[in-house]
């Protein structure tokens, strides 16, 4: 306890002489990290202490930079954090979750222990400890077997002990340290980083680092006046969730999402080593060394590098509301290191009139691929508080129109077409629209780069109704090609969607119809105003109180392939008569069709000959059965002779038919060979 008390006193003394480094600059990003800069004076031999949550230490150790002027920094040190599992491995016992006391004591066999049972104190060495299950006569209990100083073995009921104490001070301290380690692992106490110096000079010290921080949020007001140019007003919502106040800090807001990740640098890392032992003394055996067949050559030294990029945007004020001299013109700048942010603080902007009586005292600048808004005046935000800071007030090229994108509704939506003419990037966020001095609706806007254009919808227009009618024409063959015996046919189907828009209001409107972009479909005549990844956009002018129809025709082309050998002459004639087929193709397909007809006619003759042969064979079998049955009957010789003459005539016919079958088969082979040659040479 004395050592622990002395340690606390020493730490308190160190804290008393620690220099203060207040927060002077904050840069918030869109990817969950914030850049913080602290600056102050470090006296001779003085140390500065920076306090962080334990969960922030990985990012601090990854990003911390120190900039000093006037002396030298001796080094940095910080409160370490050993992994709990590694810390607990050093103890001779382990305490598991919901573990019984007997199970813990059983790990300490041989340790001396004192147990109090009323006025009696029993001291001895632990032999074992165990749980005894409940029986009919006794409940479950825990029992300890102890070798007492007299040499006897005693079984003691742990549940009856009023107190248990380790007799060895070292083991008692280990038990306390074990519990302290468990308590520290659950603790979310702060960790400290110390900046030490052994120099005898005073110096200015700046510490910069990145830690997790809430992302800043954009919120816009689009003011559409009855006369004059529309104005876009931007507010930044900033949250201070740190444990200290931000007092007159220089605040910057960066749009974009740099790549960031968590690397485990805070907790000590241990590497398992391989076990190695000397070999046992044994008889040596021959060693066979493999022969080399290639020798590596030393390569020249090279250096590698990487680049990172982000994307995003920002906004800045325009000439209508502000003096152009108060703002820095946006320009491409190289990526700056965190330590140089302090060199870019703009002068405070003089207040000027605006449509909503606010002054957006922020300037905008490109930072590599990102975009930065710098608040002109120092900002004060108390801990656990948030603030809304105006960062934009600029005229914006805006066009009011209607857009119909939700085809499940008959009404389009009121929309505004925003063209970013500010020369800056507008960060994404919600937009509240005020139309003619009244609330008009709300919309969401994605990040809008300079010169880009975006549509935002903010209300349903009940004064316009839209219906759709669909029509489809019969499939038409467009192209016929043949190569290597395969007939390729391209056919097209025309589909038309006719949109009918009824404007019941007595004022003219401009309507944008979003027509789905479908793979495999091609527009026939219309030219869209715009094309997105999913839709065509067509602009239609609606007169006051009028109805207008707008038709969108598309063509879908299918391509099918057929083997010419599988086509019948009748099917081929359909393609031969098609106007899409060339004259040469018509002639070639005609010859193929004629050849197929000859083959078909020859096959018909072969089938007829086979049927005739089958009929004659049937007649011969009948005559032979009749002759066989009459030979055993007397007086039937004349009939037998008649049957024999008929049988001979059938044989002559069969011989002629078989000769014809042979000729037809030869002709079939010849015709098929000619067809194969014709198909092989066929191309158009």
Image (cartoon, rainbow, N blue to C red):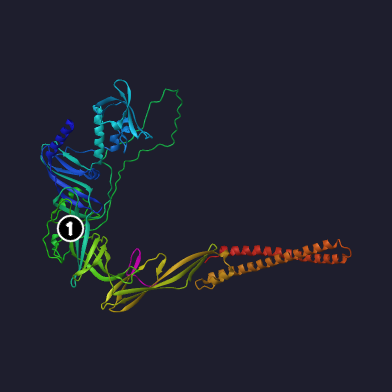
Is residue 138 visible in the rendered image? The answer is: yes
Q: Residue furthest front?
A: 137
Seen at 37% across and 38% down, the residue is 297
The stretch in magenta equals 524-537
Seen at 80% across and 62% down, the residue is 625
Q: Nearer the viewer, residue 342 or 163?
A: 163
Q: Which residue is mark 1?
A: 388
Where residue 310 sits, quadrant-wise, is bottom left
Magenta span: chief secondary structure: loop
Is residue 106 visible in the rendered image? The answer is: no
What SS does tag 1 mark? Answer: strand
Where residue 11 sits, quadrant-wise, is top left
Q: Is residue 287 above or below residue 680?
A: above
Left of 224 or right of it: where is 616? right
Q: Position of residue 162 (x, y in %)?
A: 25, 31
Q: Position of residue 431 (x, y in %)?
A: 23, 63
Q: Position of residue 486 (x, y in %)?
A: 53, 63
């Amino acid at each position: 306890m004395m050592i622990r008390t002395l340690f606390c006193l020493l730490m308190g003394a160190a804290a008393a002489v620690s220099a203060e480094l207040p927060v002077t600059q904050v840069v918030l990003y869109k990817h969950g990290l914030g850049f913080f800069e602290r600056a102050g004076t470090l006296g001779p031999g003085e140390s500065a202490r920076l306090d962080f949550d334990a969960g922030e230490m990985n990012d601090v150790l990854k990003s911390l930079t120190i900039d000093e002027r006037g002396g030298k920094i001796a080094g940095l040190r910080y409160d370490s954090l050993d992994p709990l599992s590694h810390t607990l491995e050093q103890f001779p016992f382990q305490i598991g979750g919901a573990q019984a006391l007997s199970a813990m004591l059983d790990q300490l066999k041989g340790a001396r222990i004192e147990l109090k049972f009323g006025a009696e104190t029993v001291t001895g060495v632990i032999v074992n400890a165990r749980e005894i299950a409940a029986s009919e006569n006794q409940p479950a209990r825990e029992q300890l077997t102890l070798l007492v100083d007299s040499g006897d073995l005693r079984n003691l009921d742990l549940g009856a002990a009023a107190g248990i104490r380790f007799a060895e001070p070292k083991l008692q301290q280990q038990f306390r340290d074990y519990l302290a380690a468990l308590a520290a692992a659950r603790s979310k106490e702060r960790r400290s980083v110390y900046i030490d110096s052994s120099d005898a000079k005073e110096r200015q010290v700046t510490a910069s680092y990145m830690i997790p921080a809430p992302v800043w949020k954009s919120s816009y007001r689009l003011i559409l006046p009855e006369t004059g140019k529309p104005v876009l007003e931007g507010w930044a919502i900033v949250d201070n969730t740190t444990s200290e106040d931000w007092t007159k800090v220089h605040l910057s807001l960066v749009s974009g999402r740099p790549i960031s990740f968590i690397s485990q640098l805070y907790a000590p890392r241990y590497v398992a080593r391989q076990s190695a032992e000397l070999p046992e003394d044994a008889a040596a055996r021959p060693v066979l060394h493999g022969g080399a067949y290639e020798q590596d050559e030393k390569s020249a030294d090279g250096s590698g590098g990487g680049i990172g990029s982000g994307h995003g945007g920002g906004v800045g004020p325009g000439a209508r509301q502000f003096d152009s001299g108060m703002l820095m013109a946006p320009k491409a700048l190289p990526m700056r290191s965190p330590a140089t942010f302090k060199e870019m603080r703009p002068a405070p902007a003089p207040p000027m009139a605006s449509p909503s009586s606010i002054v957006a005292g922020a300037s905008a600048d490109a930072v590599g691929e990102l975009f930065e808004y710098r608040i002109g005046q120092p900002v004060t935000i108390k801990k656990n508080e948030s603030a809304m800071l105006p960062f934009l007030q600029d005229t914006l090229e805006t066009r009011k129109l209607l857009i119909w994108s939700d085809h499940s509704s008959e009404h389009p939506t009121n929309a505004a077409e925003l063209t970013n003419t500010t020369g800056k990037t507008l960060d994404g966020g919600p937009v509240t629209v005020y139309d003619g001095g009244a609330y008009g609706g709300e919309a969401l806007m994605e990040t809008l780069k300079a010169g880009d254009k975006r549509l935002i919808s903010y209300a349903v227009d009940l004064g316009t109704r839209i219906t759709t009618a669909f029509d489809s024409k019969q499939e038409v063959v467009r192209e016929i090609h043949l190569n290597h015996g395969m007939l390729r046919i391209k056919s097209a189907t025309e589909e038309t969607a006719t949109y009918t828009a009824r404007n019941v209001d007595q004022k003219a409107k401009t309507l944008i119809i979003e027509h789905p972009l479908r793979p495999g479909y091609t527009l026939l005549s219309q030219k869209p105003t715009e094309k997105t990844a999913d839709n065509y956009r067509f602009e239609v002018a609606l007169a006051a109180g009028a109805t207008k129809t707008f038709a969108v025709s598309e063509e879908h082309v299918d391509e099918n392939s057929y083997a010419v050998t599988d086509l019948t002459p009748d099917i081929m004639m359909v393609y031969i008569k098609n106007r899409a087929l060339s004259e040469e193709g018509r002639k070639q397909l005609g010859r193929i069709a004629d050849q197929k007809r000859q083959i078909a006619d020859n096959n018909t003759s072969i089938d007829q000959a086979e049927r005739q042969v089958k009929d004659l064979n049937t007649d011969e079998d009948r005559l032979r059965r009749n002759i066989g049955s009459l030979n055993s009957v007397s007086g039937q010789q004349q009939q037998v002779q008649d049957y024999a003459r008929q049988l001979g005539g059938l044989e002559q016919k069969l011989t002629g038919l078989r000769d014809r079958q042979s000729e037809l088969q030869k002709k079939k082979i010849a015709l098929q060979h000619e067809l194969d040659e014709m198909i092989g040479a066929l191309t158009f």
